[in-house]
Image (cartoon, rainbow, N blue to C red):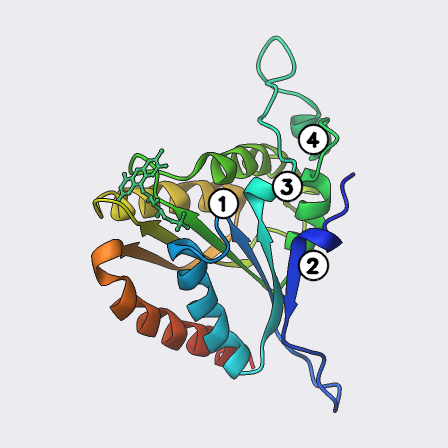
Amino acid sequence: MGKLSNKSRVYGSITRNREYKMRTVIISGSQNPDGQTGRAADALFQGMVDKGSQGEKLFLPKMKIRRCRQCDDRGWGICRTEGRCVIEDDFAALVDKIKSADMVVFATPVYFGDLSESMRALLDRLRRTCMNEAGKDGISGKLAVGICVAGGGGGGAPSCAVSLERVLCTCGFDVVDLIPVRRQNLDMKLDVLRITGEWLASRNA
Ligand SMILES: Cc1cc2nc3c(=O)[nH]c(=O)nc-3n(C[C@H](O)[C@H](O)[C@H](O)COP(=O)(O)O)c2cc1C
């Protein structure tokens, strides 16, 4: 199992008076922490932090998340029988982080009107483990938000959002919001994302 601690940044803090703070994990499928996807995710999270949330941001391209092996003759593996994946990489540790969070933000750049490859690799494996009760435990009903950033010509963010919603629902997440962004409206959407983050944090306060 991989260690994630040196690949993440921690935001927010434990409160001095020990009141509970909503914990969010932001999972980015972009190579670039300071790119358009990063700016969008940061705006959402800033809104959450402003309302007392805390959390952590993880960059999938910097982690070892291999693609599914379709293990047996019928394409299944221990994902179906045990709710976990046979591949020894960062997947299991990332799933633990997802399970211990109150909310998960999936932020992906739009590639070909769809998810980035690193986001696809994660969610392809996660939906399989979630077919089993043990794998689903801790994920079913968990709040999730999607951000899809079409940073090139600007097309494909809505179709990417549909793709993301489908796979998150298959996993069992409660998909609270999906926010398509295109290069041309990024600056305007940063405000929308920040306000959405404030709302997400305060509705759970
Ligand atoms: C393989 C590939 C496919 C892409 N497809 C699209 C697309 O369908 N629509 C679009 O607007 N931008 C497309 N882009 C541009 C990315 O959306 C853009 O680089 C990304 O949103 C920028 O995010 P980042 O700054 O986080 O890397 C594509 C980029 C790559 C590398």
In space, the residues marked 4 and 1 are separated at their CA atoms by 24 Å
Going by the numbered disc 4, the residue's amino acid type is Cys
Near-viewer residue (57 or 198): 57
Q: Is residue 174 visible?
A: yes
- Mark 3 vs 4, N-terminal side: 3
Instruction: Find residue 85 and name its label.
Output: 4
Check disc 2 and report the residue beneath it.
100
Near-viewer residue (197 or 132): 197
Check if mark 4's residue and mark 1's residue have beta carbons within 8 Å.
Answer: no
In space, the residues marked 3 and 2 are separated at their CA atoms by 19 Å
In space, the residues marked 2 and 4 are separated at their CA atoms by 18 Å
Residue drawn at (26%, 54%), measured in percent from left and top? 182
Residue drawn at (34%, 69%), measured in percent from left and top? 190
Residue drawn at (52%, 83%), measured in percent from left and top? 51
State which mark lies toward you, 1 or 2.
1
Check disc 1 and report the residue beneath it.
31
Going by the numbered disc 3, the residue's amino acid type is Met
Check if mark 3's residue and mark 4's residue have beta carbons within 8 Å.
Answer: no
Other-residue count near label 4 (Cα within 10 Å), few / some / many at <14 / 14–19 / ≥20: many
Going by the numbered disc 1, the residue's amino acid type is Gln
Residue 113 locus on image (x, y percent)? 29, 38
